[in-house]
Image (spheres, grey):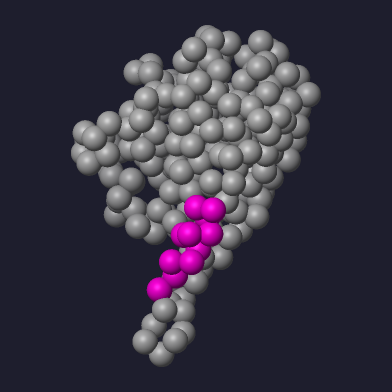
Amino acid sequence: MTVTLSAADYELSTRSASGFILKYIAPRLEPVMLYGPLARRFPFTLSAPHSDVIIAVGHGDYDQVNGQNDAVILKVGEYNDNEIQNKVIYAFSCLSAAGLGPDLINHGATAFLGWNEDYLWEIDESQLMTPWRDKLAAPCMMPVIDGLNALLDGKTVSQVHQIQMDSYDKWASMADVNMDGTVNETDEIIKDLVQFNQSNFVLYGDPQARISPRPPLSFLFRHVSPPPLLMPV
């Protein structure tokens, strides 16, 4: 079965989140992905029924996750059960765990991972063309990458959740300390953001659910970045 990846890329925050996915996750997936302009409802309805896992990257609300230009991908009361039944769903979007996550489980999804509050992070706008190099965003982005890679390794969703929580702890502990023992204010803000995102990361459904393992990230993709991205339109 395939992975359905829907990843919006049309403004600063979606460019940042999807850029990290493009660098660290996409090379492990099938070549056909719903990236940028393809991250819309109709292509999703064609791909999702044939997948064992759905990864949605974009803005969200308590009852939905969105794609390109806020096109609705999944919304309570507006999807077909065969799109989500027996699947693990990872929604990298704000708020969607509050309402959409439980609804997906009630309609047959095996497990759901997501957030019941907004997802917050700092962005370096100078890295718009190469968002995976953004050192301000990395402390909040890399725990997501660690969790998704664990999912693609075939770990149970309970293990995925714990691996991601541990990664948040690691990045939160990396705030620089000045010579006088005080914490750098910029890093302290980032630490607070990491811990906020960690506190709102939830798992619903079968904790023992897992997907078929995907091939690991090859040596080439570990060390060679994607080409610079075009400006969002």
Q: Residue furthest bottom?
A: 180
**Image spot of residue 173 (x, y percent):** 48, 66
Query: At which x and y percent is residue 8?
Result: 46, 32
Instruction: Name the quadrant of the C terminus.
Output: top left
Tell whether position 192 is magenta: no
Q: Is residue 95 visible?
A: no
The relative height of residue 155 versus residue 137 in the rendered view (above or below) is above
Left or right for 172, reference 202: left
The kind of secondary structure the magenta stretch mainly shows is helix
Q: How many marks?
A: 0
Q: Residue furthest right?
A: 106
Q: Quadrant of residue 87?
A: top right
Q: In terms of depth relative to the viewer, which is nearer, 40 or 200?
A: 200
222 or 73: which is nearer to us?
Answer: 222
Residue 11 vertical position relative to residue 192 in the rendered view, above or below: above
Magenta residues? 166-176
Residue depicted at 64% across the width and 27% down the height:
209
